[in-house]
Image (tube, helix red, strand yellow):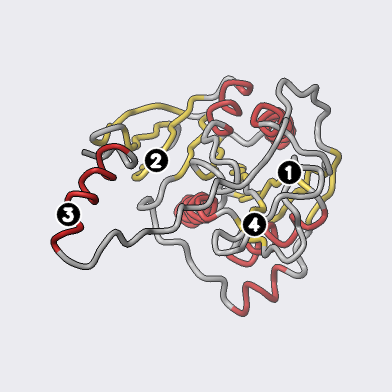
Amino acid sequence: MKLAVCVSHVPDTATRIKVGSDGKTIDPNGVTYIINPYDEYAVEEALKVKEKSGSDEVVILSLGTENSKETIRKALAMGADSGILLKDDQHRDSLGVATALAEEIKTQDAKLVFMGKQSVDYDNSIVGQLTAEILNYNCVPVCVKLEIEGEKIIAEREIEGGREIIETSLPCVITCQKGLNEPRYASLKGIMAAKKKVIEEKPAASYTPTSEVIKMHLPAGKQPGRIVGSDASAVPELVKLLKEEAKVI
């Protein structure tokens, strides 16, 4: 069986982000990019399924520019078999991303699809569910435990205030949450092997946008603190400010 893992090339969460001159995109200068952290759980889970079966093939899919090959190589170094870059230089909304991924998943005839529960750049948390809907696959979002026996899937997923155990079947899209597994580090042997593995380039499926980024801006900075006094005489003024200005009491 072919297993597809969808990964995103995203800014490192420790990188200082600046808005580009167009006011609609991120300024890439000085930004460090990494594999989306939640997607690492997806890669690891696919590799575990492959190792258990002994015969499955893991293909990595990523939508983006030439730079996304760095992220695909990371997944290949972990142990995936091959990669496909769906090239598109333009920003896509979640439905656009899902459309491109679904089209390639159909081409690959992958019946089990893994991806992170969300990407840490736009945090929409919906691409997995949209992809499953387009493919008419079952879907288990926010998965933290997974068992696969033949066509049957038993999964545990996070819901508000608790966890839910569900049973479903292939074909299926699984979106992965922290706690599902512990992603492996790429070994030196894996890194060297990844350099020889094939990354196929394809144009992403065409898509007419249903939404548009009008403006992007950083959140407003915090107001500086104020010292209203140094002894008990300042208490009345402090209480007044908390009531009238901060409105917390």
x and y percentages locating residue 8 in the rendered image: 64, 49
Query: How far from the left and from the top, in percent, is residue 48?
Result: 46, 55
What's the distance in space between the residues labelled 2 and 3, CA to CA?
50 Å
Task: List the residue tagged with mark 1.
Answer: 63
Q: Residues within 10 Å of mark 4 (few under 14, many from 20)?
A: some
Dot 1 or dot 2, earlier in sequence: 1
> The residue under label 1 is which amino acid type?
Leu
Residue lying at 63% horizontally and 21% vertically, measured from the top left: 134
Which of pointers 3 and 4 lies earlier in the amino acid sequence? 4
Of residue 220 and residue 70, the one placed in the foreground of this image is 220
In the image, residue 87 sits, relative to residue 14, either above or below, namely above
Residue 186 vertical position relative to residue 131 in the rendered view, above or below: below
Left/right placement of residue 56 relative to residue 180 reads right
Which residue is labeled 2 in the image?
Answer: 143
| Residue sitting at the far bottom | 188
In the structure shown, which secondary structural element does the residue marked by tag 4 occupy?
loop
* Residue that carries the numbered disc 4 in the rendered image: 17
Going by the numbered disc 2, the residue's amino acid type is: Cys
**Cα distance between the residues tagged 1 and 4:** 21 Å
Nearest the camera: 56 or 96? 96
Camera sees residue 156: no
Q: Say which quarter of the image contains residue 101.
A: top right
